[in-house]
Image: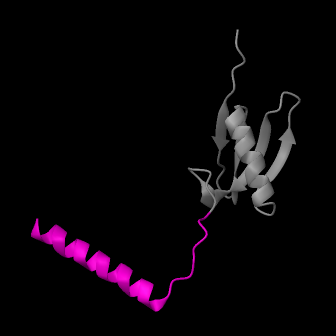
Amino acid sequence: MADIGETSYEILNGDTYFTTTAATRWSVNMCKRLKEEFPDKVEIVFENPDGSLLVHFPKSWFPKIRPPRKRKPMTDEQKKAVADRLAAGKANKLLE
């Protein structure tokens, strides 16, 4: 029989984090990569002998384990261009 890996999530009311049990290779690698990138936000609580992990992530990252995007500062011209595109899109949608 092949090894079966499972990744599960647990959220408890009142906690500021959620717990992940990562047993599939891709999820273990992702958890380790995020721990390296965000050492103050991701906590690897336990690593089992089979390589699976018990990890805490910030609750705001749930339901997808994705850290907040890094945003580039926009110039006033860029902000105006975005606002103009949104306004044009809304106007086109109203005409349809």
Principal SS element in the magenta part? helix
Q: Report the side of 86 relative to 28 (left or right).
A: left
Q: Image quarter for residue 15?
A: bottom right
Is residue 5 in the magenta section? no
Image coords of residue 7 (percent x, y) = 66, 35
Count of marks placed on residues: 0
Q: Nearer the viewer, residue 85 or 13?
A: 85
Residue extending farthest to the bottom is 76
Identify the residue at horizontal 74%, vertical 41% (top origin): 29
Q: Image quarter for residue 21?
A: top right
The C terminus lies in which quarter of the figure?
bottom left
91, above or below 96, in the image: below
Image coords of residue 19 (percent x, y) = 71, 46
Identify the residue at horizontal 26%, vertical 79% (top origin): 87
The N terminus lies in which quarter of the figure?
top right
Residue extending farthest to the left is 95
Residue extending farthest to the right is 49
Identify the residue at horizontal 84%, vertical 47% (top origin): 45
Is residue 80 in the magenta section? yes
Specify start and end residues of the magenta stretch as a single range: 68-96
Identify the residue at horizontal 70%, vertical 13% (top origin): 2
Q: Report the side of 73 relative to 10 (left or right).
A: left
Q: Report the side of 83 relative to 43 (left or right).
A: left
Q: Nearer the viewer, residue 4 or 56?
A: 4
Image coords of residue 84 (percent x, y) = 30, 82
Image coords of residue 95 (percent x, y) = 10, 70
